[in-house]
Amino acid sequence: MITAEAVGWKVGGAQILDDVSLAVAPGELLGIIGPNGAGKSSFVDVLSGVVRPTSGRIRIRDADVTRLSSTRRARMGLARSFQTSALFDGLSAGENVRLAVQAAGPAAFSPFRRVGSAALEVVDTLLSRVRMPGRAATLARDLSHGDRRKLELAMALASDPAVLLLDEPMAGVSAEDVDGLGEIIGEVRDSGVAVAMVEHHMHVVLGLADRVAVLHHGQLLAVGAPTDVVADERVQQAYVGEAL
């Protein structure tokens, strides 16, 4: 569904990503892990079009999108979340989702794009999907951190994406909320969406991911089944001094 072919990204004299090739299939969850500074978020930025690679190509389905903007990629079925909050705190949860629905694009692109009472029904559907039924009127600023993350996920799903990129969706979330978020993300994957997720909670990655990719110094160190990857001596050495 989305493919990176020998992707590199260089800023000045610094090689941030170097010859990274990965693909994510429909209905697959690829966990992306690595030590701090490995290039994980940079890779998500390249996939989503926030930055343009200096070498290699990005494909969505069979289309080369390397030079397309993040907006154009969104209209081709790609959505993403960010490490930092992208919510409008002064608006309600429902209003935040409704903005995402209205920004999703023409009706031909998103079946969720609606107006009037139909739009309200879509908001309720998306909030229920992330286990926040009946929370539409709650101001975003009054939500717990875990619910804020769920709301951001609902907004990312507003375009009914074929590809979902998640950059540390559980950062700062309490232990009890982590498992709930993991279940929701697993349900999104099971619906047929191709999911690539950067995450530091290893038990979540090992429990959810169909495959795990390890980045180290901007290069692809290992990729494969979760248990095989964490047992790899090269991966363990890369994580010396950090939790694995």
Image (tube, grey):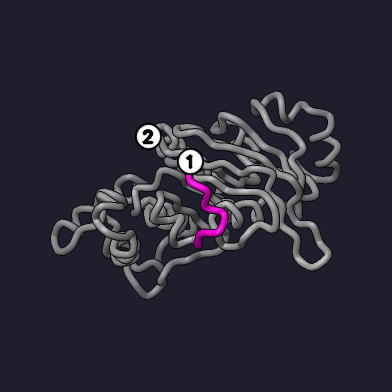
> Can you identify the residue that label 2 sits on?
191
Left or right: 163 as drawn, with respect to 241: left
Question: Sequence-wise, which precedes: disc 2 or disc 1?
Answer: 1
Residue on which the image places disc 1 = 62
The residue at the point 43 percent across, 57 percent down is 152
Q: Residue at x 32, y 66 (%)?
A: 99
Residue at 83% in and 65% down: 13
Residue 61 image position (x, y, % from top left): 47, 40
Q: Which residues are the magenta region?
A: 61-69
Mark 2–mark 1 distance (CA, rounded to whole Å): 21 Å
Secondary element type, mark 2: loop
Secondary structure category for the residue under label 1? loop
Magenta stretch holds residue 193: no
Residue 177 visible, this angle:
no
Quadrant of the snapshot with the C terminus:
top right
Q: Is residue 158 visible?
A: yes
